[in-house]
Amino acid sequence: MVELEKLWRSVGPPLGNAWSTLDIVGGMCGRKRACMLGR
């Protein structure tokens, strides 16, 4: 379990950054967000 926590700490932040970037790009596109919401 400690190993998993270490792994998450090393992988978590970059993943979060990537997700934020995706969110920004999706917001700029607009359509992707609408698709994700199912409209």
Image: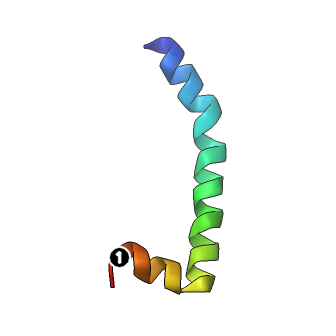
Please give left or right for residue 8 compared with residue 38 in the image.
Answer: right
| Residue 18 screen position, x and y as percent | 65, 55
- Label 1 sits on residue: 37
- The answer to which quarter of the image holds residue 9 is top right
Would you place residue 13 above or below residue 23 in this image?
above
Which class describes the residues within 10 Å of circle 1: few (<14), some (14-19), or many (20+)? few
At 62% from the left and 74% from the top, the residue drawn is 24
At 54% from the left and 30% from the top, the residue drawn is 8
In which quadrant is the N terminus drawn?
top left
| Residue 13 screen position, x and y as percent | 62, 43
Would you place residue 17 above or below residue 38 in this image?
above
In which quadrant is the C terminus drawn?
bottom left
- Going by the numbered disc 1, the residue's amino acid type is Leu
- What is the number of callouts on the image? 1
Q: Considering the numbered disc 1 on the image, is that residue within a helix, a strand or a loop?
A: helix
Query: Observer-nearest residue: 13 or 28?
Result: 28
Furthest-top residue in view? 2
Query: Observer-nearest residue: 38 or 14?
Result: 38
At 64% from the left and 30% from the top, the residue drawn is 10
| Residue 29 screen position, x and y as percent | 60, 84
At 56% from the left and 69% from the top, the residue drawn is 23
Query: Observer-nearest residue: 29 or 14?
Result: 29
Q: How is this picture coloured? A: rainbow
- The answer to which quarter of the image holds residue 27 is bottom right
| Residue 21 screen position, x and y as percent | 65, 65
Would you place residue 28 above or below residue 11 in this image?
below
Would you place residue 14 above or below residue 11 in this image?
below
